[in-house]
Image (spheres, grey):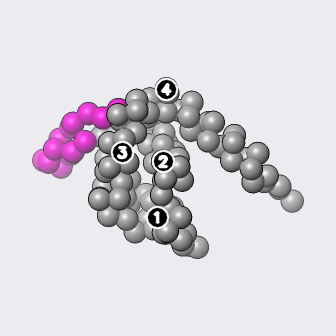
């Protein structure tokens, strides 16, 4: 797997990746550790909790995701789900990205 440059993995890029991963989790929701594991598996980037939790908090504050506490393996964990507003923004990001970087299929 090709590894992404960690230096460019922030801002709108990180925000759109987090929204995408949480959206893919659908009704179940996704906890922070699961998000970290998925980023590593899908994008080859090792990130710490200090990299994603502030972004998750910001997404929640803006109404793009919501969270709830649940017991996972006898421990409390916070599960994140995307909101309708978050899904709309995610679609906008990818539509705008396609206009900036056209994708051609051979």
> Is 48 rendered above or below residue 54?
below
Residue under label 2 = 15
Looking at the rendering, the stretch of residues picked out in magenta corresponds to 66-78
Image mark for residue 41? 1
* Magenta stretch holds residue 27: no
Query: Mark 2, mark 1: which one is toward the viewer?
Result: 2
User: Can residue 27 be seen?
Assistant: no
Q: Residues within 10 Å of mark 2 (few under 14, many from 20)?
A: some
Spatial distance from mark 4 to mark 2, Cα to Cα?
Answer: 16 Å
What whole-number distance in Å separates the C-alpha atoms at marks 4 and 1? 26 Å
Q: Residues within 10 Å of mark 4 (few under 14, many from 20)?
A: few
Q: Which residue is mark 3?
A: 56
- Name the one closer to the observer, 81 or 27: 81
Which residue sits at x=13%, y=47%?
Answer: 74
* Residue drawn at point x = 43 percent, y = 65 percent: 40
Residue 15 visible in the picture: yes
Label 2, label 1: how far apart the Cα atoms are: 17 Å
Which disc, if any, is residue 84?
4
């Amino acid at each position: 797997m090709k590894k992404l440059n960690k230096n460019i993995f922030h801002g709108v890029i990180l925000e759109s990746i987090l929204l995408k991963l949480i959206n893919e989790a659908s009704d179940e929701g996704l906890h922070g550790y699961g998000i970290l594991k998925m980023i590593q598996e899908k994008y080859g980037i090792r990130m710490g909790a200090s990299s994603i939790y502030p972004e998750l908090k910001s997404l929640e504050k803006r109404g793009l995701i919501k969270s709830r506490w649940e017991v996972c393996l006898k421990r409390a964990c916070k599960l994140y789900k995307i909101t309708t507003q978050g899904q709309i923004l995610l679609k906008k990001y990818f539509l705008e990205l396609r206009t900036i970087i056209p994708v051609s299929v051979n």
